[in-house]
Amino acid sequence: MKPRRQRMLAVGLALAGVAIAAGLTLRAFQDNMMFFIEISDVIAGEYPKERNFRIGGLVVEGSVERAEGSLDMAFLVTDTRCDLAVMYSGVLPDLFREGQGVVAHGRMNDDVFVADRILAKHDENYMAPEVAESLAKHVQDETTHLQEGPGPAECVSQ
């Protein structure tokens, strides 16, 4: 084989290797990507059915229920317009409290969000950006609703 042909073969194989590596990397990112879905959208049925996603909001006061001697628990999370039932089995973060912000990772099972991980805000001034935007949007919608009259359909609490 001539040296020129060897160089061309080497360049071609290197480009093919880079293309395969890039394709595998993009595929891994796509499989591991987790979207934040607002609670109102989840209630409306607009969420990925076959994959995990994140929700966030405030834990509704008085909604936390835990069986005695069990790690299983249920609670409601709200975006100030809609409430979503969440079930979780495991140890909660120390900062998890009613009335505080929370982000839950998991998927829907019928009408209940089954979380596999719960994240609580780490101090009283911080809130996950997605949760803060969602809450601010729904507070703004509620303010507009009060000023201008009926707007989008209200959620029914669960």
Image: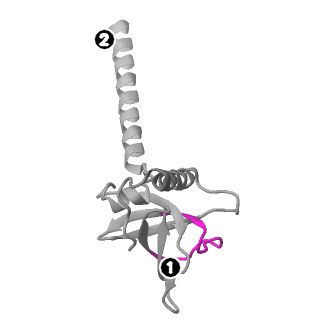
Residue 63 bears which disc, if any? 1
In this orientation, which residue lies closer to the viewer: 19 or 130?
130
Q: Kindly identify the amino acid type of the residue bearing the numbered disc 1.
A: Ser
Please tell me whether residue 97 belongs to the stretch shown in magenta.
yes
What is the distance, in whole Å, between disc 2 and disc 1 at their CAs?
Answer: 76 Å
Q: Secondary structure at mark 2?
A: loop
Return the residue at label 2. Answer: 1
- Residue type indicated by callout 2: Met
Vertical placement of residue 32 versus 92, above or below: above
Q: Position of residue 145 (x, y in %)?
A: 45, 54
Q: What is the magenta segment's predominant secondary structure?
A: loop
What segment is highlighted magenta in the picture?
87-104
Q: Residue at x 36, y 7 (%)?
A: 4
Q: Nearer the viewer, mark 2 or mark 1?
A: 1
Residue 134 position within the rendered picture, expressed as x and y whole percent measured from the top left: 50, 53
Crowd rating for badge 1 (residues with CA inside 10 Å; few <14, some 14–19, many 20+): some
Q: Is residue 35 above or below residue 19?
A: below
Determine whether, in the image, residue 112 is placed left or right of residue 79. left
**In the figure, residue 9 lies in which quadrant?**
top left
Q: Position of residue 42 (x, y in %)?
A: 36, 59
- Label 2 vs 1, first from the N-terminus: 2
The verdict on residue 75 being magenta is no
Q: In the displayed image of the protein, which residue is found farthest to the bottom?
A: 68
Question: Alpha-carbon neighbours of circle 2 within 10 Å: few (<14), some, or many (≥20)?
Answer: few
Residue shown at 37%/49% (left/top)?
A: 31
Res 123 → quadrant? bottom right
Q: Which mark is residue 147?
A: none
SS assignment at label 1: loop
| Quarter of the rendering occupied by the C terminus | bottom left
